[in-house]
Image (tube, rainbow, N blue to C red):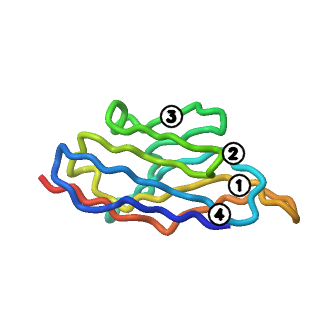
Amino acid sequence: VQLVESGGGSVQAGESLRLSCAASGNIFGINDMAWYRQAPEKQRELVAGITNGGSTNYADSVKGRFTISRDNAKNTVSLQMDSLKPEDTAVYYCNARVLVKRPWYFADVWGQGTQVTVSS
């Protein structure tokens, strides 16, 4: 099972980016999906999460600016980032709790990360 992210890049403050993440492999289902980020010399932090039922939660720092969504049929999760700020600069990671089939087990899977750079 793997997660592949896309959509990172460099933008000016106030602009938007959309990150996407696709899961593939021997997947029966996916529970929670989330986006984390890690800035230089800082710990990885949760940005936004979404359950398989569509309930969402956000870090206070991104509420009102970022929107997480998912497509259960395609095993994808996206993060729409608007009104970006320089402090949003970080490597963004996709995360998913995946039910793998045959053998059956839950796996906590991470993407490789995608860089987002916001300049003032």
Q: Amino acid at mark 4?
A: Ser
In the displayed image of the protein, which residue is found farthest to the left? 120
Horizontally, is 120 left or right of 45 in the view?
Answer: left
Q: CA distance from mark 3 to mark 4?
A: 24 Å
Secondary structure under tag 1 reads: strand
The residue shown at (41%, 37%) is 67
Q: Quadrant of residue 1?
A: bottom right
Q: Position of residue 117 (x, y in %)?
A: 25, 60
Q: CA distance from mark 1 to mark 4?
A: 10 Å
Horizontally, is 116 left or right of 56 in the view?
Answer: left
Residue indicated by mark 1: 98
Q: Nearer the viewer, residue 90 or 31?
A: 31
Q: Nearer the viewer, mark 2 or mark 3?
A: 2
| Number of residues whose C-alpha sits closer than 10 Å to that of mark 1, classed few (under 14), some (14–19) or many (20 or more) | many
Looking at the image, tell me whether mark 1 or mark 3 is earlier in sequence order: 3
Looking at the image, tell me whether mark 3 or mark 4 is earlier in sequence order: 4
| Number of residues whose C-alpha sits closer than 10 Å to that of mark 4, classed few (under 14), some (14–19) or many (20 or more) | few
Label 2 close to label 1 by CB (< 8 Å) = yes
Q: Position of residue 70 (x, y in %)?
A: 55, 43
Secondary structure under tag 2 reads: strand
Residue indicated by mark 2: 31
The residue shown at (32%, 36%) is 65
Give me the disc on residue 48.
none
Q: CA distance from mark 4 to mark 2?
A: 14 Å
Label 1 close to label 4 by CB (< 8 Å) = no
